[in-house]
Amino acid sequence: MLEQGNPDVQAAREAFPRGLAQPDGGFRFGADALLLASFAAGLAAGPRAADLGTGCGAAGLGYLLAAADPAATCLGLDRDPDMVRAAGQNSAALGLSDRFMALTADLRVVRGDARCLPESRDLILCNPPYRDPASGRRPPGLARDAARFEVDGDMADFAAAGSYLLANKGIFACIHLAERLPLVFAALAERRLIVKRVLPVASRAGAPAKLALVAARKNGGPGMVLEAPLALYAGTGAHTRLTEVALAFCPFLACNPGPAGES
């Protein structure tokens, strides 16, 4: 394992998320995973996290790098063994092998997995597939299809797995399409995950939010905060750049500050 003082580790951390290993032909993580990492790092949760559908580990590893607690740990779960191997490789490169462990696991049957203990986590990170399989143009490749469409688990499955793993009063943090928030809220409520905070994410100030970051507390009480939208970009054309507010919220976004990063 690489030690924190190793110059290679330091360089990898400074470059994050650049340089993360990702399987050829697999789904490529995007800004949503980085936004989720920063959002989760700002929540008042305990040190034991789990990243459901971790992929190459971008959200879970980003959370550990951004978290104020140096003792924080994260368990990454993913069905794709190639992604799990990449997540382990990235964890080692960042000197986080003692704090991040990736397992090949199907979140739909997490209750039957002896490696995943009930109520063993204080925080769940979740960047689930956004689309219903019956809608939208399906991408080539099974891995990319499963990452974008609910073919290997939908929001209800993620909520069920998260609730099972979360300790009482633990926090479930996810990012999803704003247009599907009713579905997200319903799936969370069914598993006693009470929405406490919603941060809409818009491409620009004044534009409709297309994404939303959501924090829910297991067995939480009533009361929710709807925050002002986070605007990601300002300027037009070649002058399009990330806003100062977006960079302050998620410094990892600086890896792609120009117009090419706009979605």
Image (cartoon, rainbow, N blue to C red):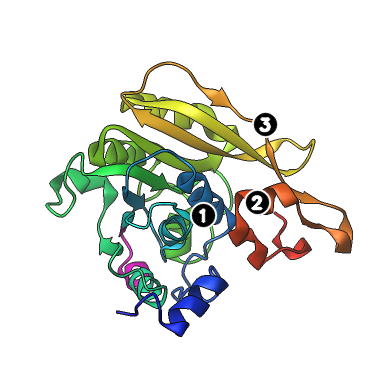
| 178 lies left or right of 117 | right
Q: Which residue is mark 2?
A: 248
Local SS, label 2: helix
Q: CA distance from mark 1 to mark 2?
A: 16 Å
Q: Residues within 10 Å of mark 2 (few under 14, many from 20)?
A: few
| 202 lies left or right of 205 | left
| 128 lies left or right of 19 | left
Kindly tell me whether residue 132 is visible in this rendering.
no
Q: Residues within 10 Å of mark 3 (few under 14, many from 20)?
A: few
Q: Position of residue 182 (x, y in %)?
A: 51, 26
Mark 2 or 3: the one toward you: 2
Instruction: State the extent of the magenta-drawn residues as a range.
Output: 75-85
Local SS, label 1: helix
Residue occupying image coordinates x 50% and y 71%: 13
Q: CA distance from mark 3 to mark 1?
A: 20 Å
Q: Which residue is mark 3?
A: 228
The amino acid at mark 2 is Ala
